[in-house]
């Protein structure tokens, strides 16, 4: 088992290894004494891991209740949060109790938001069950729900007490869902670690999976510790995300997050290379890696004007500018503010 400690305002440990779900209850007792524990999960994950997680918690002395919602991004909304609050109230969950987020990114974001806001804050533990959640969304304390105006526009920073990543859960993922996490792993390599990027480019993910998970988590740990509230260097993690979120929104969330991020990385790199801000050949390099893992690199369903309209509601907008992440080279990224008056002209290079 690997153990990575995150030194945020409220420090916590990330456990990565095989078979951890069976012992998750005992592991959680190390950070939170037995109490009432509310599992929040979706219907897909519940059918796979709900009973095992509940049994482990009960064996460790927790009184368990469970809230299960329909899987998918459309459930990551205020109405689902309201339903979860009602369940917590009905089961007498207090500030001294615990919420357990069991699932992928949607579950972790929603459960974390509920934990951050119910009774002004209840402790929670993340148990990610997808590659994407394991390396990205379960780490760092960002929680949120979507509203009609855009993705993750209502949220809070709320660090978990612990993250438990059982690598065995990744074996049940479909190729498409696993590939969403692969896009995020490629992102980490592209912005921070060329050696990780080259490992992925060589097709070595499957034979180095736990190593890749730990490296990605450690890279995110580094940025989160530097910038817990996402006002500076942590924004580098948004590489591909501004345009990726546009793809998600414009597709009505039929393009899932990781695949949208892959498209966003390709689009923004095409733009920056066209403008001479990224070395020639970088886009083709990135496209080759995305193709290795059967990830998409373009979205034909919208115009540059539609992308701009959605991007105006992005969280990374500051006054009259929008900050995007560009590759200075593979392994190093920079923050690049764009005046909103120049946004359409800037992004139009992705359509050339």
Image: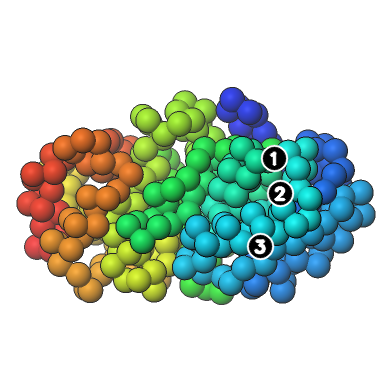
Instruction: Report x, y in % for residue 10.
Output: 63, 28
Which residue, given by chain and number where applicable, does mark 2 sit on? 99
Residue at 39% over, 65% down: 259
Give me the C-alpha separation between circle 3 and circle 2. 10 Å
Residue 41 disc label? 3
Q: Please tell me whether residue 113 is drawn above or below residue 261 in the rendered image.
A: above
Residue 327: which quarter of the image?
Answer: top left
Does the residue at mark 1 contact the one at mark 3 (Cβ under 8 Å)? no
Q: Please tell me whether residue 19 is drawn above or below residue 113 in the rendered image.
A: below
Give me the C-alpha separation between circle 2 and circle 1. 6 Å
Residue 237: which quarter of the image?
Answer: top left
Q: Secondary structure at mark 1?
A: strand
Name the N-terminal-most of marks 2 and 1: 2
Query: Is residue 85 rendered to the left or right of residue 217?
Result: right
Label 2 neighbour load within 10 Å: few <14, some 14-19, many 20+: many
Which residue, given by chain and number where applicable, does mark 1 sit on? 123
Instruction: Report x, y in % for residue 66.
Output: 75, 62
Quarter holding the C terminus is bottom left
Q: Secondary structure at mark 2?
A: strand
Residue 159 disc label? none
Of 206 and 40, the residue lying toward us: 40
Query: Is residue 207 rendered to the left or right of residue 100?
Result: left
Does the residue at mark 2 contact the one at mark 1 (Cβ under 8 Å)? yes
Q: Secondary structure at mark 3?
A: strand
Q: Please tell me whether residue 10 is drawn above or below residue 96 in the rendered image.
A: above
Query: Is residue 19 rendered to the left or right of residue 127?
Result: right
Instruction: Report x, y in % for residue 91.
Output: 78, 55
Quarter holding the N terminus is top right
Label 3 neighbour load within 10 Å: few <14, some 14-19, many 20+: many
Does the residue at mark 3 contact the one at mark 2 (Cβ under 8 Å)? no
Residue at 32% over, 64% down: 249
């Amino acid at each position: 088992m690997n153990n990575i400690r995150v030194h945020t305002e409220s420090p916590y440990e990330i456990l990565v290894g095989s078979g951890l779900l069976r012992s998750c209850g005992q592991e959680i007792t190390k950070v939170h004494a037995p109490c009432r524990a509310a599992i929040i999960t979706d219907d897909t994950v519940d059918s796979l891991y709900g009973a095992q997680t509940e049994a482990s918690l009960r064996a460790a002395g927790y009184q368990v209740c469970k809230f299960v919602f329909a899987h998918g991004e459309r459930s990551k909304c205020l109405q689902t949060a309201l339903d979860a609050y009602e369940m917590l109230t009905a089961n007498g969950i207090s500030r001294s109790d615990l919420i357990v987020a069991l699932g992928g990114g949607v579950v972790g974001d929603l459960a974390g938001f509920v934990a951050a806001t119910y009774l002004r804050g209840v402790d929670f533990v993340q148990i990610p069950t997808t590659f994407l959640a394991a390396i990205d969304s379960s780490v760092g304390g960002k929680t949120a729900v979507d509203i009609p105006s855009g993705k993750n526009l209502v949220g809070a920073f709320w660090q978990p007490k612990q993250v438990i990543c059982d690598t065995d859960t990744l074996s049940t993922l479909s190729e498409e869902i696993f590939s969403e996490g692969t896009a995020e792993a490629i992102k980490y390599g592209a912005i921070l670690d060329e050696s990780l990027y080259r490992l992925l480019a060589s097709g070595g993910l499957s034979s180095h999976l736990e190593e890749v998970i730990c490296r990605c988590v450690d890279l995110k740990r580094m940025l989160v510790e530097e910038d817990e509230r996402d006002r500076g260097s942590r924004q580098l993690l948004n590489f591909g995300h501004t345009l990726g979120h546009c793809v998600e929104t414009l597709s009505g969330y039929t393009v899932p997050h990781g695949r949208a991020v892959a498209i966003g990385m390709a689009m923004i790199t095409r733009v920056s290379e066209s403008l001479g801000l990224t070395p020639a050949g970088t886009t083709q390099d990135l496209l080759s890696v995305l193709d290795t893992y059967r990830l998409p690199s373009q979205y034909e369903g919208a115009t540059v004007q539609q992308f701009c309209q959605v991007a105006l509601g992005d969280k990374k907008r500051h006054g009259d500018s929008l900050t995007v992440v560009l590759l200075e080279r593979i392994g190093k990224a920079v923050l690049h503010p764009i005046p909103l008056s120049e946004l359409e002209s800037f992004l139009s290079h992705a359509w050339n």
